[in-house]
Image (cartoon, rainbow, N blue to C red):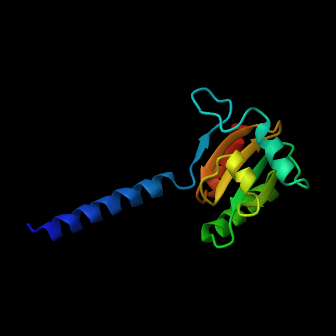
Amino acid sequence: MTTGVVVAVAAVALAVVLGVTKVLTDGRFRRTGSHPGSEPRAEVGEAWASVSAAVPDAALGERATLVQFSSAFCAPCRATRRVLTDVASSYDGVVHLEVDAESHLDLVRTLKVLRTPTTVVVDAGGHEVGRASGAPRKDQVLAVLDRL
């Protein structure tokens, strides 16, 4: 085999591995906050304190708040907005709050948001209980809310 063929095969293999990894992890919620075995992203209650300081007109949901970080040219952000709006409108006590990541860089840094869309689930006490990077499916969002 020539070096060019080996490089091409390696590139294709790497692309397949990265693609499968993205499909398996994109939009999946992982527990955060005070759950055993998890690394907290912010101190208990600090998640909502940071959000409400950056977005003063934001309201905390009676059951949960779905905080979506978006950017202007993010196509998956539009799909995430539709899913989260649908869930919030059909679940009592759940609020959807969309935050423009570019306009709230301090909040993005505080909550360690690395990409858009990122959805942070905050419980009624202001505690971050889960987050997903990428566009979550409706069943994934409902599963997180059912755990509350």
Residue 6: quarter of image: bottom left
Q: Position of residue 35 (x, y in %)?
A: 64, 30
- Rendered location of residue 107, percent (x, y): 74, 51
Residue at the image position 64 percent from the left and 51 percent from the top: 113
Residue at 68% across / 34% down in the picture?
33
- Judged left or right of residue 2, residue 95 is right
Q: Which residue sits at x=46%, y=53%?
A: 24
Closer-to-camera residue (41/142):
41
Count up the numbered dots: 0
Quadrant location of the N terminus in the rendered image: bottom left
Q: Position of residue 103 (x, y in %)?
A: 76, 63
Quadrant position of the C terminus in the picture: top right
* Residue 36 appears anywhere in the view: yes
Q: Nearer the viewer, residue 130 or 103?
A: 103
Residue 137, image x and y in percent? 61, 57
The answer to whether residue 90 of the structure is visible from this angle is: no
